[in-house]
Amino acid sequence: MLDRENEPSKEVSELRKRAIRFRADVDENIEQRKQTILKVCQSIVQRQGEFLDRGIDELKPMMIKEWPRRLGYTRRL
């Protein structure tokens, strides 16, 4: 498939392009996941600040249905 003396075949070029696109998509997905995790952590600290400062008596319930709104998503789970 890859001959060092000649230009890469069309198939090799296409595979290389697909691999580069795939890698860019993976990088973008990882960055989105990182940002979501950061938002979740910030929201937990904000909601549970009194618990973190004062202890278990200040623990507030957190419902899964709250998370889309807290994270800025408009679609409901």
Image: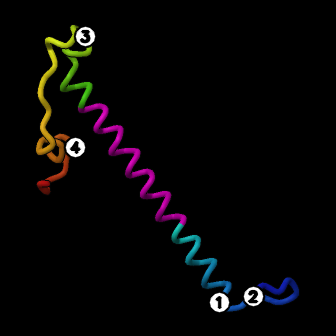
Secondary-structure class at tag 1: helix
Tell me: residue 46, above or below residue 50.
Answer: below
Name which residue lies at 16% across and 19% down. 59
Q: What amino acid type is highlighted by mark number 3?
A: Asp
Secondary-structure class at tag 4: loop
If you read the primary sequence from the N terminus, does the residue marked by circle 1 or circle 3 appear first? 1
Question: What residue sits right under mark 3 in the picture?
Answer: 53
Give yes or no for contact between labels 1 and 2 (Cβ–Cβ under 8 Å): yes
Q: CA distance from mark 1 to mark 2?
A: 8 Å
Q: What amino acid type is highlighted by mark number 1?
A: Glu
Most foreground residue, 30 or 56: 56
Question: What residue sits right under mark 4 in the picture?
Answer: 71
Question: What residue sits right under mark 2 in the picture?
Answer: 1
Q: CA distance from mark 2 to mark 4?
A: 47 Å
Tell me: residue 33, above or below residue 43.
Answer: below
Q: Which mark is residue 50?
A: none
If you read the primary sequence from the N terminus, does the residue marked by circle 3 or circle 4 appear first? 3
In the rendering, at what x and y percent does residue 15 appear? 61, 81
Is 59 situated left or right of 18 in this image?
Answer: left
If you read the primary sequence from the N terminus, does the residue marked by circle 4 or circle 1 appear first? 1
Residue stretch in magenta: 23-43
Quarter containing the C terminus: bottom left
